[in-house]
Structures are given as structure tokens and as C-alpha cells.
């Protein structure tokens, strides 16, 4: 196909091309389509494929024209991609299509292509790797969290305190100063589930008691119409439950695993916290180094990839449709950095041959299975079903890339 391609925009990753297909090529495509119809068409009074060509062309004129158009545009698009050596990353858009009898077919082709990334500087960066020290307070906090996870909720007959769980029936007056119907709620006091005035009212009652008084709604209440209003509120407290955490002793340590004493549990917690501190330091070092690499090697980022990532996070966080535009505006810079980061890692991996192979993934899964005492085949099948093999592949590749970068940029 002897097409003519005229670039109208070729900045960064965006391409806008004017494509023209000669009349001769359009006619040839139309002839091929018409011949195919002539061999397949079923017209009353004629056997399949035996109707006169002129009759077939007349009866199927619209279909022949539409299929010709689709075929020519498709072939022209493929020719453009091959000739211009483009790597499209999005579905192309066709604009200003002109398809008239006796004239060349023309259209504008709009698409985004994979960016050309030239990482000319990958060494000489200064990044400080800081490991946060693990203190006795950190260990105590982790042990308290473990106690809290094993805590039980026990009924009490006292007035509730912050942190207690309560079941309460609440009602407030409306604008006509009429008390509404009481509705039952289950709340954890002090967690922000109810406004401060309502919580204070609840804490005045014992289980089985009803209390009421005027409560002022806060000036920053989400519902603007209710801000600053004072209403009569009534609370009937049905029950109170208070959290009771187990004693931190040797018995608790044995419940948490293969630990004979609290000291043994404490030592393991300290080891785990130190390991996580090292991992956090590595993650921060990687982030700082990549930021410097990106600053030293600027390149354009495809809008389609950024938008796709934003949409993926919006779905993961279950952002309502009405809030998606605001979310996209706030999250876009983070998504763009993520795309840049992934492209840098991918480019280095390709240049240096660090990409993980199937054998690498198999070896990693086998290592994971041995550490868990699990069957390698079953674990592989489970990871494959959960879609996590790609995650393992990416992690192996990234670890190799950053090990290589660390050699070129020793951490201070």
C-alpha cells in the first residue's frame, strides 16, 4: 500500500499523523471485497456465488463500502506502524476521516507511543541510607499491640469510658423541636464515630439508664446544614463492654508461638523490628536514588499509563464516581512518579539483562516452599491462581537492578 504519512505532531510520546491512501489502493481493496461478496452472496433465483457481479454490487453496496473502509484503514494503520517504527501503547484514534468516491482516503491517526528512554547517567549519586534504631519503647509498643489483638470484650455495669464499646439508642430533636425516633447504634467511644457532645452524654449513663440534654453540633461537622446547631439529645444505654488484654507473662508468650518465656518473645520481636527497619531503610534508599536518576535523565510519560494507574487505584480504594475526578487530580502526581519509576527499572533490566526468567521464578517458589514446609508444586499453583507470579518476577528483577545500582552508588 503506497500510503503518504505526514507528521502533524511528534512531541514526546504523542503522535498525530495525517495518512493518505491513493485512489488506486482504495479501488483495489474495494474490488477484493466485491469479489468476495460475489462468491458468497445468496440472491433469490441464483445459486450461491452465481449471481451477476453488477447485481451483487448493487444489492450489497453499503456493506461492500463499509468493509472496504475498515480494511483500508486497518491496512494503512499497520503500514504506518511498520514504516514509522512506532510502538503504540494505546488504542489509536481516527479523526477527520474522508472517504469519497474517486478520491484518496485520508484520516488523522492519533496515538501515544512507548517513550524513548536514554539513561545516560546512572552513577555518581549521593544517597544516605538511614536505619531507624529499634528502642525498648518500640518493642513495648509491639508487645502491647499483640496483647491488644488477643484482648476480649467483657460486659461491665459502670458508666462507659473512652475505649469502651457501647450499644445505645439515640434520638435528637428536629427543626420543629420534636424528638425523633430512637435508633440503635454500636459505638466505640473515643474513635470519632459520634460527635464529642453525644459521647459525653453517653458516658453520663449506666447500662439501662436514659439521659438527655442539649448538645451542640461542631462547627466543622461534615453536613454543613447541621454545623453549630444545638439540639436536645436523648441516649438510652443498653450495654457496655470493656477491653481486657491478657497479662504479658510467660503463659502469654507460649500462646504467641514457640516461646518459653516473655524474654524469648521479646527477643524475637526485637529481631523482627530490626529486620523491618533494614527493609524500610532499603525502601527509602531505593526511592531517593530513583528520584535522583529520574531527575538526571528526564523523559516523557504516556498519559494513558498514568490514567490507567489512577483508575486502578480508584477501583482498589472504591472511590465513588462523584469523587473520582477529585481523586484523580490529587493522585496523578503519585501515579506519574510510579510510572517513571517502573520505566527506569524496566529499562535498566533490559539493558543489563536482569529480567527474571521462568527458571528464576521456579527457584524462588521452591525457596519459598522450603521455608514454609510446603509442597513446591502446590505453592506454585496457588501463587499462579492468585496472580502473584508476576509479582515475584518483578521483585527478582528489581532486586537485581538495585543491587547493580548500589555497586555504582554506594550508600553513605
Image (cartoon, grey):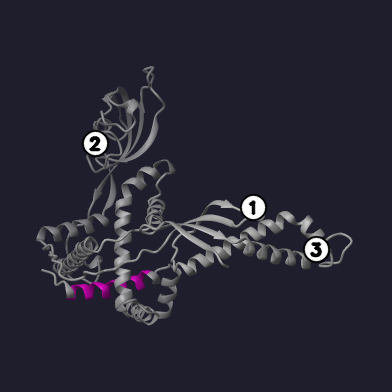
- Density class for disc 2 (Cα within 10 Å; few <14, some 14-19, many ≥20) is some
Mark number, residue 159: 2
**Residue 216 in picture, x, y percent from top left:** 26, 25
Mark toward the viewer: 1 or 2: 1
Give the prevailing secondary structure in the magenta stretch: helix
Question: Which of the two discs, 1 and 2, labels the residue nearer the N terminus?
Answer: 1
| Residue ID at (86%, 66%) | 47
- Name which quarter of the figure residue 112 lies in: bottom left
> Would residue 342 appear left or right of 274 to someone viewing this image?
right
Q: Quadrant of the N terminus?
A: bottom right
Q: Which residue does the numbered mark 3 point to in the structure image?
A: 53
406 in relation to 195, above or below: below
**Residue 179 in picture, x, y percent from top left:** 38, 22
| Element class at badge 2 | loop
- Density class for disc 3 (Cα within 10 Å; few <14, some 14-19, many ≥20) is some
Mark toward the viewer: 3 or 1: 1
**Residue 102 in picture, x, y percent from top left:** 66, 56
| Element class at badge 1 | loop
- Name which quarter of the figure residue 107 lies in: bottom right
| Along the line of sight, the residue nearer the viewer: 224 or 157 | 224
Mark number, residue 100: 1
Amino acid at each position: 500500500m503506497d500510503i503518504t504519512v505526514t507528521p502533524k505532531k511528534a512531541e514526546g510520546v504523542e503522535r498525530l499523523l495525517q495518512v493518505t491512501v491513493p485512489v488506486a489502493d482504495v479501488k483495489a481493496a474495494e474490488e477484493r471485497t466485491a469479489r468476495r461478496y460475489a462468491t458468497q452472496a445468496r440472491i433469490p433465483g441464483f445459486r450461491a456465488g452465481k449471481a451477476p457481479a453488477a447485481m451483487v454490487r448493487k444489492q450489497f453496496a453499503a456493506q461492500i463500502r463499509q468493509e472496504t473502509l475498515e480494511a483500508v484503514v486497518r491496512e494503512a494503520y499497520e503500514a504506518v506502524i511498520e514504516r514509522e517504527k512506532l510502538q503504540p501503547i494505546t488504542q489509536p484514534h481516527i479523526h477527520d476521516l474522508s472517504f469519497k468516491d474517486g478520491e484518496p482516503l485520508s484520516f488523522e491517526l492519533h496515538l501515544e507511543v512507548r517513550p524513548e528512554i536514554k539513561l545516560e547517567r546512572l552513577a555518581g549519586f549521593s544517597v544516605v541510607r538511614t536505619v531507624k534504631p529499634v528502642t525498648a519503647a518500640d518493642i513495648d509498643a509491639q508487645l502491647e499491640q499483640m496483647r491488644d489483638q488477643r484482648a476480649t470484650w467483657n460486659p461491665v455495669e459502670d458508666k462507659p469510658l473512652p475505649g469502651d464499646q457501647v450499644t445505645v439508642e439515640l434520638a435528637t430533636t428536629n427543626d420543629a423541636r420534636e424528638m425523633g425516633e430512637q435508633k440503635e447504634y454500636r459505638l466505640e467511644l473515643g474513635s470519632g464515630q459520634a460527635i464529642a457532645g453525644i459521647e459525653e452524654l453517653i458516658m453520663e449513663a449506666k447500662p439501662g439508664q436514659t439521659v438527655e440534654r442539649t448538645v451542640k453540633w461542631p462547627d466543622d461537622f461534615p453536613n454543613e446544614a447541621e454545623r453549630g446547631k444545638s439540639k436536645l439529645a436523648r441516649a438510652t444505654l443498653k450495654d457496655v463492654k470493656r477491653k481486657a488484654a491478657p497479662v504479658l507473662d510467660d503463659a502469654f508468650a507460649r500462646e504467641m508461638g514457640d516461646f518459653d518465656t516473655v524474654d524469648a518473645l521479646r527477643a524475637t520481636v526485637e529481631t523482627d523490628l530490626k529486620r523491618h527497619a533494614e527493609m524500610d531503610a532499603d525502601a527509602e534508599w531505593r526511592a531517593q536514588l530513583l528520584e535522583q536518576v529520574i531527575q538526571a535523565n528526564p523523559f516523557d510519560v504516556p498519559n494513558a499509563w498514568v490514567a490507567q494507574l489512577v483508575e486502578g487505584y480508584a477501583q482498589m480504594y472504591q472511590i465513588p464516581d462523584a469523587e473520582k475526578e477529585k481523586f484523580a487530580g490529587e493522585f496523578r502526581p503519585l501515579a506519574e512518579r510510579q510510572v517513571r519509576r517502573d520505566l527506569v527499572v524496566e529499562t535498566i533490566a533490559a539493558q543489563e539483562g536482569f529480567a527474571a526468567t521462568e527458571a528464576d521464578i521456579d527457584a524462588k517458589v521452591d525457596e519459598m516452599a522450603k521455608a514454609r514446609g510446603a509442597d513446591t508444586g502446590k505453592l506454585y499453583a496457588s501463587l499462579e491462581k492468585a496472580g502473584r507470579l508476576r509479582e515475584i518476577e518483578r521483585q527478582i528483577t528489581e532486586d537485581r537492578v538495585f543491587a547493580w545500582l548500589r555497586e555504582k552508588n554506594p550508600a553513605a
